[in-house]
Amino acid sequence: FLFLLYYLTMGGNRKRVEVCMAFGGRTECRTASGASVEEAQRTAVQNACAMLASGMTDSIACDRTPPAQVRILSGAE
């Protein structure tokens, strides 16, 4: 069970992405991992926007803003 849990969360073919978001005159960069590059990027965007936006309206607007920078760190087959 522990091996399966480790494999699903840390192992396997995880993709890591660093995303920098510019919103509201500030910039925030976050790194995330996921099963695909798209999933990792979406998570990194949400994490960066959580630091930049205040309130639901800002959060939605930030999430819809294209990233200022996207860097694939690993697993880019």
Image: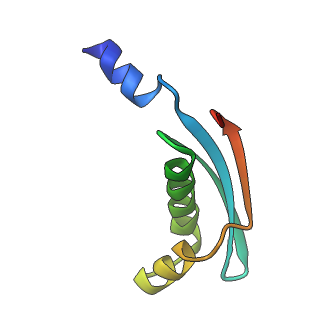
In this figure, what is the number of numbered marks?
0
Q: Residue drawn at (52%, 58%), measured in percent from left and top?
A: 42
Q: Position of residue 68 (x, y in %)?
A: 74, 67
**Residue 75 location, quadrant:** top right
Q: Position of residue 32 (x, y in %)?
A: 56, 46
Q: Residue drawn at (37%, 27%), measured in percent from left and top?
A: 8
**Residue 5 location, quadrant:** top left
Q: Position of residue 74 (x, y in %)?
A: 66, 34
Return the residue found at the far left.
1
Q: Residue drawn at (66%, 82%), measured in percent from left and top?
A: 24
Return the residue found at the far bottom.
57
- Image quadrant where one finds the N terminus: top left
Q: Is residue 14 above or below residue 11?
A: below
Coloring scheme used: rainbow
- Image quadrant where one finds the C terminus: top right
Q: Is residue 1 above or below residue 65?
A: above
Return the residue found at the far front.
77
Q: In the shown orientation, is residue 8 left or right of residue 77?
A: left
Q: Is residue 59 above or below residue 2?
A: below
Q: Is residue 60 above or below residue 68?
A: below
Q: Residue drawn at (59%, 72%), measured in percent from left and top?
A: 52
